[in-house]
Amino acid sequence: MKFFIDTANLAQIKEANDLGVLDGVTTNPSLMAKEGIKGDAQIKQHYVDICNIVDGDVSAEVIAVDYDTIITEGLALAALHKNIVVKVPMIKDGIKAIKYFSNKGIRTNCTLVFSAGQALLAAKAGATYVSPFLGRLDDVSTDGLKLIEDIRIIYDNYGYETQILAASIRHPMHIIECAKIGADVATCPLQPIMQLLNHPLTTSGLETFLADYKKVNG
Ligand code: E4P
């Protein structure tokens, strides 16, 4: 399973990348705004800065919601760096744009996916990634993991190559369950990735090993 980090914070991206297990980055307009990144030039430069840190796919989201402007924005984003994946919302013009980008060999991430039907459309349009938001479904008392399972079954039934990018991940168990289901990618904030490191028996076991070593070696 690939690990992407879901942030526009350069320090956190560096920290995850330094761990040596990072395969890419996802961002969205809210995450960019959180870092105070604003204006076309600054936003584009930030994507390039991210690409210069991580050697992997970096999702850059269009703001437009009409076909022509999605295409214009997407082409400009894709031209920034070879690792940019154009992130397009799951709307009618978005699906048409994903088909256009797919025909041109430009990679896409279909975002804001909350149903299996939406994921099926994204795959048929040729999306490289589909992003089901499992945490936001859990937030409204709907089983987000069940959606990931359903998409896995549908894609496997027909051999769709669209990769399931499990998004809106909130905690380590989301990552584990997504791995069991067979999601291709998990995109997570830094904290759940780092929480995977922790187990109290690892901590206490290491303390004992080091104390025993010290007893005989001084
Ligand atoms: C994915 O691409 C989105 O940026 C993200 O996972 C949304 O997560 P949130 O629901 O925690 O905002």
Image (tube, grey):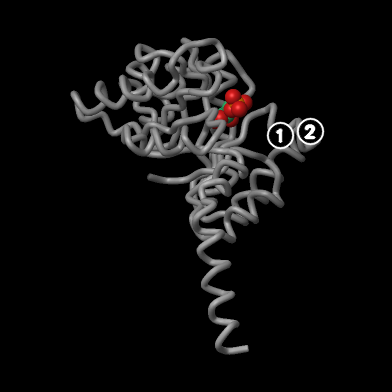
Please state which of residues 29 and 104 is positioned toward the viewer in this rendering.
29
The C terminus lies in which quarter of the figure?
Answer: bottom right
Residue at the location (56% across, 46% down)?
195
Q: Give coordinates of residue 55: x percent, y percent.
A: 52, 55
**The residue under label 2 is which amino acid type?**
Lys
Q: Nearer the viewer, residue 61 or 142?
A: 142
Q: Mark yes or no: residue 146 visible.
A: yes
Identify which residue is drawn at 53% across, 16% down.
67
Indicate whether 61 appears above or below 212. above
**Camera-nearest residue between 216 and 26:** 216
Mark 1 closeness class: few <14, some 14–19, many ≥20 residues within 10 Å: some
Instruction: Specify whether residue 73 is in view.
Output: no
Q: Residues within 10 Å of mark 2 (few under 14, many from 20)?
A: some
State whether label 1 is within 8 Å of ligand 1. Answer: no
Residue 116's place in the image compared with 199, above or below, is: above
Q: Could you tell me which residue is drawn at 43 percent across and 36 percent down?
A: 107
Task: Tell us which disc is closer to us: 2 or 1.
Answer: 1
Give the labeled residue for mark 2. 38
Separation (CA) of disc 2 from disc 1: 8 Å
Looking at the image, tell me whether mark 2 or mark 1 is earlier in sequence order: 1
Residue 213, quarter of picture: bottom right
Residue 65 position within the rendered picture, expressed as x and y whole percent measured from the top left: 59, 14
Q: Which residue is mark 1?
A: 32
Q: What amino acid is at disc 1? A: Met
- In the rendered image, which quarter is residue 158 located in? top left
Mark 2: is the Cβ under 8 angstroms from ligand 1? no
Q: Which mark is residue 211?
A: none
Q: Is residue 29 left or right of residue 22?
A: right
